[in-house]
Amino acid sequence: MIPGGGAELFFGRRGRRRPPQSVPDSGLTGPVDIPEAAQPPEPKDLRSRFARMRTSIVGTVRGLPKVARLTWQASPALTILIALVTLVSGLLPTVTAYLAKILLDSVVAAIQHRGSTGDIVRITLYQFAVLAATAITSAITTITQSLLQERMTLTIRNQVMAHASKLHLAYFEGSESYDMLRQAAQEAPSRPLSMMTSALGLIRTTITFASMIALLVSISPLLALVSLLAPIPAFISQSRYGSRAFWLTFLMSPIKRRMDYLSSLVTTDQYAKETKLFGLGPYFVDRFRKLGQVAYERQRKLTVNRNVAATSWGLLSTFAGSAIALYIALQAVGGQLTLGDLALYTAAATSVQTSVSGLFTAFSGMYENNLYLDTLYRFLHTEPEIVAPARPRPLPSTVDGHIRFESVSFSYPGTDEPALHGVSFEIRPGETVAVVGRNGAGKSTLFKLLCRLYDPTAGRILLDGVDIREYDPDELRTRISAMFQDYVTYQGTAAENIGLGDLNRLTDREHIVDSARRAGADERISRLPAGYDSPLGRWFDRGVALSGGEWQKIALARAFQREAAILILDEPTSALDAQAEHELFARLATLASGRTTLYISHRFSTVRQAERILLLDHGKVAEYGTHEELMTAEAGYAELFTLQAQAYLG
Ligand SMILES: Nc1ncnc2c1ncn2[C@@H]1O[C@H](COP(=O)(O)OP(=O)(O)OP(=O)(O)O)[C@@H](O)[C@H]1O
């Protein structure tokens, strides 16, 4: 939970953020402003202020073990080292102050012929040792901190990546999860060390404070009390602004997301062609500037207010410090204190005061960091929605590929309209089925459900007579090779692009070449400067830019690289030339032999080659049968087929 109880307010019961109002979705048009940070209401009376403070303290303290665990995971040796150095450096200021006192007293004694210069030399040597120790501990702290920071960033980024790779597809499609992921990846890595440093600072200061306060109380309990109380207002204002800074960063995420998007539109080669053609560059730059201005204004207001408030309240502490100095000086003039006492008490009073404000600053730092870390923890605790059952049914070593959809319905998260509605059909093992239908009919959705990237909202999908939810999804996916409409173009070599289809054969060159041949990509790859070892894409030096169709053949080869019982191809030839398409489908009978094959195509010349054809219409199965059967039925399929055929003939 976020300390202060603000999280409940903002995230609601189920941890979901309310959508910000009046914010344009894309940032491409509409108002650029975002609503003012919706703060949790400030407590009015003293009791609720204390209650809130208690919640903050408890929340922050509870966050500490988690941070300690993260630091420990990053490096046990560095964690121990930094803890030890902290303990030592906590005692050093008191020892320094004490040595200053006895040095002064010895000097006075020597002047009055009551002591020797030998004592002075000895004390000076001690003083040198302590100063050297202070310098060394400070250097060790700096080194350890920066090393820990590196390790911590790596550890957290690893954890974020590892967790993200386990999450279900739908998670990545929501804007609020995008914001959370962005915060977890960008803000969180620096926070634990910062929190740990504050916590260690807290311990160090406590040690200094405890040893100094003992000295101060002995001279004047009133002085001790004034030193203790003076920094409290500064602390309260700090902690208030700490939480505001957090809310602001969080609420700024949507605006930052839009800025990232606009920036990518102008700076990414993928979009450059179109932005130039339509002359969109200056428009996007202007939108970016306006959004940036809003973000800056918010940040500026907070930074100025925060620092003005902190400085004003800090003046109170300064005033108390000066009062203490005056009191001690008058005591010395009155002869109640020796010069050494004067030095010691001045040092002690200043140190107690700095310690108390140090304690509060460290605590408010921890409080603020904890708020950011909470987002990281919430991300790391997001449960993947598609997981293996407690006792997954083992998949047989050879899957028959018998697929059955039983009254399957599905709506995408956050939408009311079903993408699939009561879909039932059966595909016999080894059969080739073409899925056709208008745009948005639900064809790709059908494939995604079969791969268990989503679970049906109703009904079930059976593989070899077993509900696919009974299998481990990762294992299930090893039995499916697929090429999606929006396949990935990996910025890697041609061999890597294909090899990634089956990690077990990532470096099996013979198999990679064979997959490329089957996809019709072999000829182009052999003409590349370094053949299969040529880098593809423009991110590399000497990377080769391929055409759309050439990339598609590579993606097809990747699908063929995995020899699975089920082959799924979503518009596999959409970018291929007529001849390449013809050749691929001529080979498809061989490629698909022994596998259950499903492919989506809008070209009826290729569709008719399938053993059976499934026509989807508005998420429902409209027709299912052989080409001849559907043509005889003279319904939707026959109509679409004839339409396309006529266009060619006419
Ligand atoms: N990730 C998503 N989130 C929400 N809705 C989606 C998502 N993907 C698809 N849809 C919706 O589901 C419906 C079916 O989409 P689907 O991609 O399955 O259609 P399709 O038949 O493959 O279309 P096309 O021929 O254009 O590729 C569409 O109305 C689309 O808007």
Image (tube, helix red, strand yellow):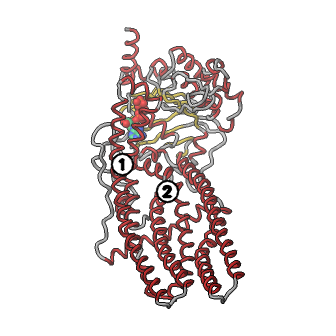
Dot 2: within a 10 Å radius of its alpha carbon, few (fewer than 14), some, or many (20 or more) residues?
A: many
Q: Position of residue 9 (x, y in %)?
A: 34, 62
| Residue 288 in picture, x, y percent from top left | 36, 39
Amino acid bearing label 1: Tyr
Q: Nearer the viewer, residue 328 or 419?
A: 328
Residue occupying the point 55% across, 45% down:
466
Do tag 1 and tag 2 residues touch (Cβ < 8 Å)?
no
Task: Give the number of the disc on residue 340.
Answer: none
Residue furthest top in the image = 650
Residue 420 appearing in the image: no
Read off the residue under disc 1. Answer: 296
Q: Is residue 245 visible?
A: yes
Q: Given the image, on which type of amino acid does mark 2 rest? A: Leu
In the rendered image, residue 513, in percent from the top left (x then y), is placed at 68, 25
Q: Nearer the viewer, mark 1 or mark 2?
A: 1
Residue 302 vs 84, above or below: the answer is: above
